[in-house]
Image: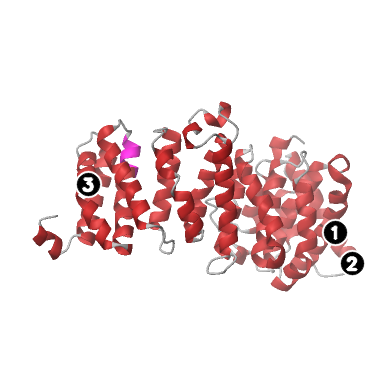
Amino acid sequence: MAVDDMAELDSHIFAIVYPHTPRSTAGDDDLSFLGGEGDLAATILARLGGSPREDFQHLCATAAAVAQAVSDQGVPATPVAYFAASAAALAPLARAGAAGADPHVAGALLAFLSAALPALPAAVVRARGREVADDVMRVLDFPSTPDSGVRAGLRCLAHLISAGDRANWEALYTVILRLSTDHRPKVRKQSHSCLRDVLLSFQRQPILVPASEAITRSFERFLLLSGGSSSVNTGAAEEGPKGAKEVLYILNALICCLPLMASKPSNTILKYFKPLLDLHQPILTRSLLDILHAVAESPTLQLKSDVLLDLLCSLGLSVSSERKSGDEMASIARLLHVGTKKIYKQNRDICVVKLPLIFTSLGDILSSEFEEARFSSVEAFKGLIDHCIDETLVSQGIA
């Protein structure tokens, strides 16, 4: 079976197990739909047993083999039984190494395991998680493991961190973070989603700080390898200096991860945004705008108000000094709206000083030829006037 034929294997498993749950990003598995009630192997066989696709045939063969192993043991076909059987089948493949393991069987086992894990009692995950995680990480290191198997393995690791014994989280987390800059787009996307899920499970816990610092170190390392922010450009993804494309990949991860990170590591990353914005590279700017919009909308992340305000002012000034697309101008208007309100809430005094600049920038967007940008500017004007302008400012003539 070709590796590309398995590209959507994990998505089909998700649809089978959670048929009513939308999947907006890779790895968004709603555990409540499994609930330990269904027979996972039987469901897969019923839905995909007649498919001519070779990847589905591998999955069905794996499901049938796991079901037979459970039946031979004379135990009910529960998630715990399926987990034990699939983990037992994965172990010899992991020990066999890349040369001795059938990559498609390994990929199908990882996919099956990733579907069984969410239904397990927490006690089982804590008791068996470390052993299974070691096998999953070994298989993920096989160059021959299909992309779909790698994505399933990432979901396994994320769940084992979130629901398992936190004493050994770092090794698993390191694998997920390493694959956030993988050359395969779907693997990267899954890694970013898993990082987000892990950070979400770490909220309001001391462990969030080292997890966030690991992302910051990765970002800084690749920025250094690229020769600094001046070397990150639109050509970097294919031909730029070593580390440049990884910076872009990490920035994509930060769109969903930075709002969930601890404040100090987040502020460390934020200080690099100004020189990156000054490169005026559209791909880079778009990622930075998406990140800033996400953190501005975060109700919990506390960033340094002066640093964030400086970024907003820089973007606002760029409206009149640089040629921009309608989408970019609309995005800047929306960011000025939510970002200024966040800063006003954190530090009113420094915010009101820059309100004239913010309103002037919104006025420049309002006078543009782009309808969406004009609409976003009007909405920003209304929101900021309502939120930031009070009688004191009116009387001072600032408004």
Residue that mark 1 sits on: 88
Q: Looking at the magenta stretch, what is its main secondary structure?
A: helix
Q: Residue furthest right?
A: 72
Mark 2 burial class by Cα count in 10 Å: few <14, some 14-19, many 20+:
few
In the rendered view, does 298 fall on the left or right side of 196?
A: left
Instruction: Read off the magenta span.
Output: 326-331
Quarter of the image containing the N terminus?
Answer: top right
Answer yes or no: is residue 198 visible: no
| x then y, percent, for residue 341 | 30, 58
Quarter of the image containing the C terminus?
Answer: bottom left
Identify the element where label 3 is drawn.
helix
| x then y, percent, for residue 368 | 23, 35
Q: Which mark is residue 73?
A: 2
Mark 3 burial class by Cα count in 10 Å: few <14, some 14-19, many 20+:
some
Q: Nearer the viewer, mark 3 or mark 2?
A: 3
Disc 2 and disc 1: Cα gap in Å?
Answer: 13 Å
Say which residue appears at 31% left-offset and 63% top-offset. 345
Q: In the image, is residue 110 part of the stretch drawn in magenta? A: no
Q: Nearer the viewer, mark 2 or mark 1?
A: 1
Q: Which mark is residue 357?
A: 3
> Which callout, 2 or 1, points at the residue further toward the start of the chain?
2
Identify the element where label 1 is drawn.
helix
> Which callout, 1 or 3, points at the residue further toward the start of the chain?
1
Q: Nearer the viewer, mark 1 or mark 3?
A: 3
| Amino acid at pointer 3 | Leu
Query: In the image shown, does 225 or 339 lie closer to the viewer?
Result: 225
In the rendered view, does 237 fall on the left or right side of 334?
A: right
Residue 319 sits in quarter: top left
